[in-house]
């Protein structure tokens, strides 16, 4: 399966399978330095090129390539505990106030657009205005939104200060600011009305006029999405030259502030429609870089055997789990969920489904195991590892009132029980995992089936509607503690957090498809995991740690999901034409939605092979 960046809501996080198709191949890496050569890759964030789409980073099909042509203020990392760490982008440096109340940005002194005009603070302010129309994390018009900006001030042509609304602060405020895409005001300013900032100020009230102003700001979002610049004007290392259904060609931006250290003269993005195509390109050594693509072991071995091939691995703050709809019997009984956890060999599942892209989860904690060692090292040894144990599984089933007849487990009333697992078509690793789990369960006397859903959007829709008994669910989305645990104890399990106030909805209401209990007993104390998760949205690092320990224990003993494997940031590269690929994990931890190789190139890390 290919991880996207958006999970979309997280999903903005992961999405369908990736692959590549059509297009030319590399012939030469060029002559080094700022030299030349063609760099060939794919855009892991979308499975197809739309030739008629605009060079618009907000258009879902837009021909804008983050890291290559479109630029952000900073390139956020997925640090284990600090969500605000980032590499420089259009912002060369920044200073975060000690109380997290503001971030002051200094722009790259030599930054220019591809038409030769300088990048200024006014470009940044306009870009922030556009971000408001999209409801971005730091630039939200929702009343009381956590981590929202209060003011945007142009200090001088190279300096911008953004303050946080401290009524409901978030420790990841700076991350939300740095993740802003910067656009040229001389091209894009027409999408915002002349009175935009007055309208935005009015939207911060709590009367009918403020509500109307908020609606007007939000309505501008569609205008932004539909905007089609006459041509691509880029502040990145490359600018779009042309695109057709097979490939997009980008050429070097001579005005890029670090152009002297950008090795390729051209970049080609190949179109793709399925995993098999990207396997073929990698096996033939035709891609200089590609993000992770799920592949069976035999294919992975062929990819590794290609001349110049190398697999680079780093940290990826995502895990995959088998999630239960506790509104459906017998999954409302924790002993059933525990019994299944004892039957599923996670090592075996990972080996079959994601041998290169994942590591078996040590246990269910709600946190990626690397992050858990950083956040709650003393708690991890206290958690039940749920190692495969048929005897323990049978004891749990008996406690749930299940009975075993003729070698098959049945429900308490004697009726048949079948574990029905769902996954979207094209998610090869998920489907392989479920088939393996099915085999393990059937061997233990638990009937099981795998049901394929047509596509990922439909899968999410039906999952949210409570149509499935069990499905796969992305979780542990770091680096911010709130983002990690809201996957288990957020809207999908009944809790919504609006303006810092957490409310709970009954199973089947307001998107609550998990249907877990509102309170859980941990260490002899009743806790409300959704309310604790809400506290993480404003807690600093030290305050977050004891809360995360409680939530990890809650997840471990109540098992709203069975954590199967923790993803690894696996990158495929080829050393035949270009070298210098980073192996430093802190560089590899790029945030979602970013084409990491573009950032590496603009930083001057990648060199043409001599």
Image (tube, rainbow, N blue to C red):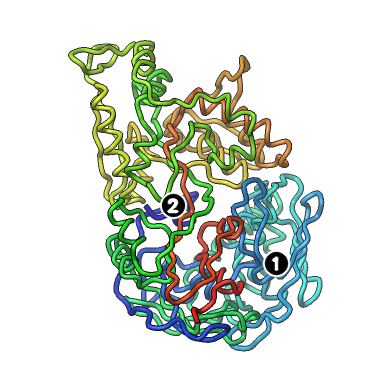
Residue on which the image places disc 2: 14
Q: Residue at x 50, y 60 (%)?
A: 593
Circles 2, 1 touching at the beta carbon (< 8 Å):
no
User: Looking at the rendered structure, which numbered label has been put on residue 435?
Assistant: none
The reply to whether residue 465 is visible in this rendering is: yes
- The percent position of residue 153, horizontal first and vertical second, equals 77, 67
Camera-side residue of 32 and 492: 32
Query: Outermost residue toward the left?
Result: 406
Residue on which the image places disc 1: 197
Q: Quadrant of residue 122?
A: bottom right
- The percent position of residue 206, horizontal first and vertical second, equals 69, 48
Q: Quadrant of residue 136?
A: bottom right
Circle 2 Cα neighbour tier, 10 Å, few/some/many (<14 / 14–19 / ≥20): many
Circle 1 Cα neighbour tier, 10 Å, few/some/many (<14 / 14–19 / ≥20): some
Vertical order, 88 against 525 (above or below): below
Camera-side residue of 501 and 44: 44
Q: Residue at x 45, y 81 (%)?
A: 29
Question: Helix, strand or loop at disc 2?
Answer: loop
In this rendering, which labeled residue sits more in front, label 2 or label 1? 2
Report the side of 92 relative to 526 (left or right): right
Q: Residue at x 67, y 80 (%)?
A: 111
Circle nearer the N terminus (2, 1): 2
Camera-side residue of 206 and 254: 254
């Amino acid at each position: 399966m290919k991880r996207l960046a958006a999970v979309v809501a997280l999903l903005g996080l992961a999405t369908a399978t990736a692959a590549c198709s059509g297009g030319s191949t590399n012939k030469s890496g060029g002559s080094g330095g700022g030299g030349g050569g063609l760099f060939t890759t794919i855009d892991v964030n979308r499975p197809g090129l739309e030739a008629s789409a605009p060079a618009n980073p907000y258009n879902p099909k837009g021909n804008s390539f983050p890291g290559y042509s479109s630029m952000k203020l900073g390139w956020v990392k997925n640090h284990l505990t600090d969500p605000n760490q980032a590499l420089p982008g259009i912002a060369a440096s920044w200073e975060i106030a000690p109380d997290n109340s503001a971030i002051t940005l200094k722009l790259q002194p030599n930054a220019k657009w591809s038409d030769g005009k300088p990048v200024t603070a006014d470009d940044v302010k306009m870009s922030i205005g556009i971000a408001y129309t999209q409801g971005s994390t730091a630039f939200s018009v929702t009343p009381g939104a956590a981590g929202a900006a209060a003011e945007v001030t142009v200090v001088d042509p190279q300096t911008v200060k953004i303050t946080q609304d401290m009524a409901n602060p978030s420790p990841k405020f700076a991350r939300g600011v740095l993740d802003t895409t910067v656009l040229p005001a001389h091209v894009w300013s027409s999408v915002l009305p002349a009175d935009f900032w007055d309208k935005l100020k009015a939207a911060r009230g709590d009367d009918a006029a403020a509500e109307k102003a908020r609606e007007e700001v939000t309505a501008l979002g569609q205008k932004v999405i539909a905007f089609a610049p006459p041509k691509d004007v880029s502040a990145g290392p490359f600018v779009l030259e042309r695109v057709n259904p097979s490939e997009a060609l980008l050429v070097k931006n001579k005005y890029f502030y670090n152009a002297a250290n950008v090795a390729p003269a051209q970049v080609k993005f190949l179109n793709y429609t399925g995993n098999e195509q990207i396997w073929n390109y990698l096996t033939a050594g035709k891609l200089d870089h590609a993000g992770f693509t799920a592949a069976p072991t035999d294919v992975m071995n062929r990819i590794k055997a290609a001349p110049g091939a190398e697999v680079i691995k780093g940290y990826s703050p995502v895990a995959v789990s088998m999630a239960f709809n506790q509104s459906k019997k017998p999954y409302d009984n924790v002993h059933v969920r525990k019994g299944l956890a004892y039957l599923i060999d996670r090592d075996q599942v990972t080996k079959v489904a994601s041998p290169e892209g994942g590591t078996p989860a040590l246990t269910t904690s709600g946190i990626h195991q690397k992050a858990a060692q950083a956040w709650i090292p003393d708690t991890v040894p206290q958690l039940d590892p749920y190692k495969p144990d048929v005897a323990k599984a049978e004891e749990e089933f008996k406690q749930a009132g299940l009975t075993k007849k003729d070698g098959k487990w049945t429900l308490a009333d004697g009726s048949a029980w079948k574990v029905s697992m769902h996954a979207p078509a094209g998610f090869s690793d998920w489907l392989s995992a479920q088939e393996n789990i099915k085999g393990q369960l059937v061997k233990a006397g638990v009937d099981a089936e795998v049901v394929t859903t047509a596509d990922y959007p439909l899968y999410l829709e039906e999952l949210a509607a409570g149509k499935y008994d069990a499905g796969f669910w992305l979780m542990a989305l770091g680096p911010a503690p709130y983002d990690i645990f809201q996957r288990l104890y957020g809207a999908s399990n009944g809790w919504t957090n609006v303006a810092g106030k957490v409310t709970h909805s009954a199973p089947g209401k307001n998107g609550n498809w998990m249907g877990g209990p509102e309170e859980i007993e941990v260490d002899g104390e009743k806790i409300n995991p959704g309310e604790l998760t809400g506290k993480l949205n404003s807690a600093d690092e030290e305050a977050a740690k004891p809360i995360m320990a409680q939530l990890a224990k809650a997840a471990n003993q109540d098992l709203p999901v069975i954590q199967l494997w923790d993803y690894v940031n696996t990158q495929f590269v080829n050393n035949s034409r270009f070298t210098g690929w980073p192996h430093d994990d802190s560089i590899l931890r790029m945030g979602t939605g970013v084409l990491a190789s573009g950032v590496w190139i603009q930083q001057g890390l990648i060199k043409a092979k001599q």
